[in-house]
Image: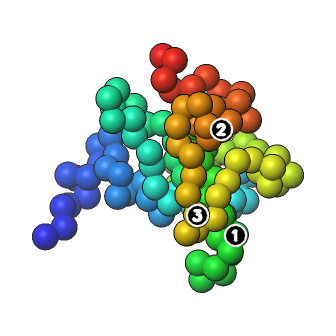
Amino acid sequence: MQASTSQRETNTLISSDKVEGTAVRRPDGDKIGEIERIMIDKRSGKVAYAVMSFGGFLGFDEEYFPVPWDKLTYNTALDAYELDITEERLRGAPKYRAGTDYDWSQEGGGKRVFDYYSSPPYWTF
């Protein structure tokens, strides 16, 4: 049995299944991709990343971009998460392809993601 919308969202909270699949757009409304999943720190409970899917066709050649959660802002007018990033900057961001492993460790891919986006790592606050 699926939970009703009122059980999955409030004015300040949203369940993860409602975040997954939500569009990610630039401030001008252009669609960049969509939220594939969110990554939560087990110990602190903080949302660390949104993993955004981008490109591909029918799941082929799709790339996944870990984006620090604090770089996304929910825009009610767009009904999407907003990420202010150029196409060129996005193409150079840390990413991985479906079926490959990604180093989520703080010392590996985690640090690289936060450095790339000039964002303080979630594990420092």
Picture quadrant of residue 108 = top right
From mark 2 to mark 1, how far is it between C-alphas?
19 Å
Q: Residue furthest top?
A: 125
Amino acid type, mark 3: Thr
100 or 82: which is nearer to us? 100
Note whether residue 53 is visible: no
| Badge 2 vs badge 3, beta-carbon distance below 8 Å | no
Tell me the kind of residue under disc 2.
Answer: Val
Image quadrant holding the N terminus, namely bottom left
Determine which residue is flagged by label 3.
Answer: 100
Say whether residue 102 is left or right of residue 54: left
Q: Is residue 118 visible?
A: yes
SS of the residue under disc 1: loop
Q: Earlier in the sequence, mark 2 or mark 1?
A: 1
Label 1 crowd bin: few (<14), some (14–19), many (20+), radius 10 Å = some
Residue 55 marker: 1
State the SS at label 3: loop
- Position above or below: 56 against 16: below
Residue 17 location, quadrant: bottom left
Residue contact between numbered discs 2 and 1, judged by CB atoms under 8 Å: no
Q: Nearer the viewer, mark 2 or mark 1?
A: 2
Left/right of residue 37 with respect to residue 3 in the rendered view:
right
Measured as percent of width and height from the top left, residue 88 is found at: 86, 52
- Residue 24 percent coordinates (x, y): 61, 55
